[in-house]
Image (cartoon, rainbow, N blue to C red):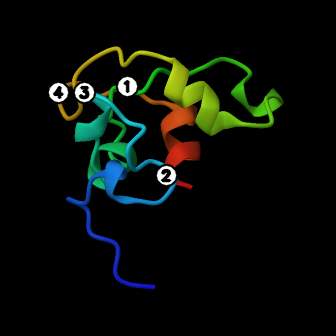
Amino acid sequence: HGDLGLKQKLSDFPGFQNVLVAPKNEIEIQHLLAQTSGVVDLPNMWEFPDTISLFLQQPLFSAPGLQFAYSNTGSAVVG
């Protein structure tokens, strides 16, 4: 295990490598933590067993880093 960098892209991590396409491949850890990832807040997402699959299926509402919007989904993705 290594250090987690705020500027590390989500696409650098196992499970996300080679599956994230633009603009999701530009999401950084800092975007997820600061609620600026552009990840849509999916209602009732806690009822679904695979939040990551839901995240992969949904488009972003804005480019990563541009707009603040609270997202439970983004928080779940960052873990």
Crowdedness of circle 1 by 10 Å Cα count: few (<14), some, many (20+)? some
**Residue depicted at x 56% and y 33%:** 73
Q: State which quarter of the image contains the C terminus.
A: bottom right
- Tag 4's secondary structure? loop
Q: Amino acid at mark 4?
A: Leu
Marks 4 and 3, how far apart at CA: 12 Å
Can you give x and y, in whole percent of width and height, for residue 45 in the image?
70, 26
Marking on residue 66 = 4
In this view, 56 is above or below 10 = above
**In contact (CB < 8 Å): disc 4 and disc 1:** no
Marking on residue 23 = 3
Can you give x and y, in whole percent of width and height, for residue 54 in the image?
61, 26
Q: Nearer the viewer, residue 18 or 40?
A: 18
Q: Amino acid at mark 2?
A: Val
Q: Which residue is the site of mark 1?
A: 69
**Foreground disc of the pair 2, 1:** 2
In this view, 47 is above or below 8 = above
Crowdedness of circle 3 by 10 Å Cα count: few (<14), some, many (20+)? some
Q: Which residue is the site of mark 2?
A: 78
- Tag 2's secondary structure? helix
**Which circle's residue, 2 or 4, is located before the other in the chain?**
4
**Which circle's residue, 2 or 3, is located before the other in the chain?**
3
In this view, 43 is above or below 34 = above
**In contact (CB < 8 Å): disc 4 and disc 3:** no
Q: Nearer the viewer, residue 70 or 58?
A: 58
Marks 2 and 4, how far apart at CA: 18 Å
Q: Nearer the viewer, residue 46 or 70?
A: 46
Can you give x and y, in whole percent of width and height, for residue 65 in the image?
19, 35
Q: Amino acid at mark 3?
A: Pro
Marking on residue 36 = none
**Which circle's residue, 4 or 3, is located before the other in the chain?**
3
Q: Is residue 68 left or right of residue 2?
A: left
